[in-house]
């Protein structure tokens, strides 16, 4: 039926070609007895199993297998660090022809959605009632896992649309917002409810949530506060946070703000301080917004660039320059506006000219929830302290935390990996409490 439909239009024919290619690619898998790809996956996805199902054309079974470990397959298939995780561990890399695992996962997720393949039968939501604060990768993972286990779940999001960093942080050229919204629709189909425009610590509190009947609460708010670099001249106009640029670019593309409200304009000369993935995203976004020049400034040599090699390569291809071995010393300006950055190099001091500078040197958690809740302890840097048993519970009984707000900024799949462990901890805790109440 799908092939008959495909013959009617060019777009569907391309999809069929992709499916055929995916099945051919899947049939190259050696189905190793000790799959290194699975061991290298932070969530231990059953990679050989779903590839084997795809090899026989059973995409429904492949989607079911992926769903045992991942609630965000279309996202993971696109933005996971495949090159240093599953694909990097494939034994066929020795021949230079490793399996394209990410592309296969993406294809399975896309086909299942487009063909409206039915989900497995859902459990009744009678096991417990859990609140999830934050709708980024960690929050969505916990919500999906608990819903599949028979819990009623409500996700609270401060912004007007769920998705967190997937929506507001990762630019569209790396992750389509349509894909993010589609994944959230799939999680809603599991019975998860979303409550947006709700700031915990302002509109409601953790204490109120317990009073409202939640058995447990998960904090997955990530690291919302960008770190600053308060050098002399920091008050100059033109010094911005990369994360803020990425968010404003998304809001503009969603027709929620005007173009002039996006800080980078055509003809700008831009410096980006920091060479992680956020720095690459900001640099490439600035180029796409029409900046005349974009240069990433970082302290070490090329080996110190913490962004994925593929992201670094993509930035180079788009015309982004790099200046390594650079220690920022002072922001330089005239009439209150930035004109450049003074740096220290191995050969002495140097001036880099720019009228916009984007900081991408990391982030830290906000303290609104902790400061309005009794009993949640954090470390000296503001990261939430958790226990090993039940895994993920904070120093406040019944309150759990996971993802970047605990383990510091990491990749999407690493946040998901920790979130899955916390979800299991929540199940253990709520089940135990219910048993004691009998």
Image (cartoon, grey):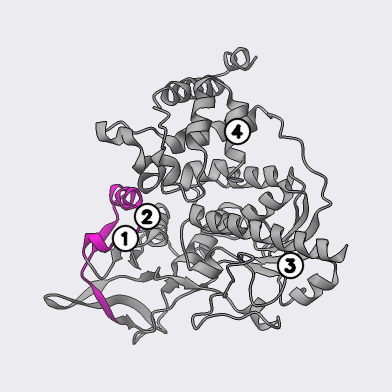
Q: Disc 2 vs disc 1: Cβ atoms closer than 8 Å? A: yes
Task: Depth check: give the residue in front, 61 or 13.
Answer: 61
In front: mark 4 or mark 1?
A: 4
Give the alpha-carbon distance from disc 4 to disc 3, as whole Å.
33 Å
Mark 1 is surrounded, within 10 Å at the Cα level, by few (under 14), some (14 to 19) or many (20 or more) other residues, namely: many
Cα separation, mark 2 vs mark 4, equals 37 Å
- Classify the position of the N terminus by image quarter: top right
Is residue 198 found left or right of 31 in the rendered image? Answer: right
SS class, disc 2? helix
**Secondary structure beneath label 1:** strand
What x and y, as percent, mark residue 114?
63, 30
Q: Is residue 173 visible?
A: no
Which comes before the other along the chain, label 2 or label 1? 2
Q: Earlier in the sequence, mark 4 or mark 1?
A: 4
Name the residue that disc number 3 marks: 198
The residue tagged 1 is: 294
Task: Report the side of 110 relative to 171 (left or right).
Answer: right
Closer to the N terminus: mark 3 or mark 2?
3
Q: Secondary structure at mark 4?
A: helix
Extent of the magenta region: 301-329
Left/right of residue 304 with respect to residue 119 in the rendered view:
left
- Let me know if residue 176 is in the magenta part: no
């Amino acid at each position: 039926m799908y092939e008959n439909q495909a013959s009617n239009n060019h777009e569907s024919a391309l999809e069929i070609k992709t499916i055929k290619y995916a099945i051919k690619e899947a049939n190259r898998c050696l189905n190793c007895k000790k799959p290194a790809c699975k061991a290298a996956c932070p969530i231990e996805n059953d990679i050989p199993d779903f590839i084997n199902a795809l090899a026989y054309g059973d995409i429904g079974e492949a989607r079911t297998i992926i769903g045992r470990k991942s609630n965000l397959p279309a996202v993971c298939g696109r933005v996971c660090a495949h090159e240093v995780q599953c694909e990097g561990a494939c034994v066929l890399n020795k021949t230079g022809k490793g399996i394209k695992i990410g592309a296969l996962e993406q294809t399975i997720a896309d086909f299942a959605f487009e063909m409206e393949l039915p989900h497995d039968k859902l459990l009744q939501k009678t096991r417990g009632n859990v609140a999830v604060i934050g709708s980024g990768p960690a929050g969505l993972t916990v919500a999906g896992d608990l819903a599949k286990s028979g819990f009623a779940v409500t996700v609270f999001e401060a912004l007007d649309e769920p998705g967190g960093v997937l929506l507001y942080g990762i630019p569209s050229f790396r992750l389509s917002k349509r894909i993010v919204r589609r994944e959230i629709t799939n999680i809603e189909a599991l019975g998860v409810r979303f409550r947006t425009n709700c700031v915990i610590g302002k509109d409601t509190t953790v204490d109120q949530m317990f009073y409202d009947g939640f058995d447990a609460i998960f904090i997955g708010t990530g690291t919302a506060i960008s770190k600053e670099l308060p050098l002399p001249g920091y008050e100059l106009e033109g010094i911005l946070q990369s994360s803020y640029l990425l968010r404003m670019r998304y809001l503009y593309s969603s027709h929620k703000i005007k173009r002039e409200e996006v800080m980078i304009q055509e003809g700008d000369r831009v410096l980006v301080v920091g060479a992680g993935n956020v720095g690459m995203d900001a640099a490439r976004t600035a180029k796409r917004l029409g900046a005349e020049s974009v240069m990433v400034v970082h302290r070490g040599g090329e080996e110190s660039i913490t962004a994925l090699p593929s992201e670094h390569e993509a930035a180079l291809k788009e015309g982004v320059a790099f200046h390594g071995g650079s220690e920022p010393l002072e922001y330089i300006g005239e009439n209150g506006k930035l004109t450049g950055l003074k740096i220290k190099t191995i050969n002495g001091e140097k001036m880099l000219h720019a009228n916009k500078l984007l900081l991408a040197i990391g982030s830290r958690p906000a303290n609104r929830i902790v400061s309005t809740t009794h009993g949640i302890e954090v470390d000296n840097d503001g990261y939430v302290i958790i226990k090993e048993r039940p895994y993920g519970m904070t120093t406040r009984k019944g309150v759990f935390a996971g993802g970047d707000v605990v383990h510091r900024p990491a990749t999407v799949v690493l946040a998901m990996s920790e979130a899955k462990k916390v979800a299991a901890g929540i199940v253990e805790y709520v089940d135990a409490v219910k048993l004691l109440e009998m």
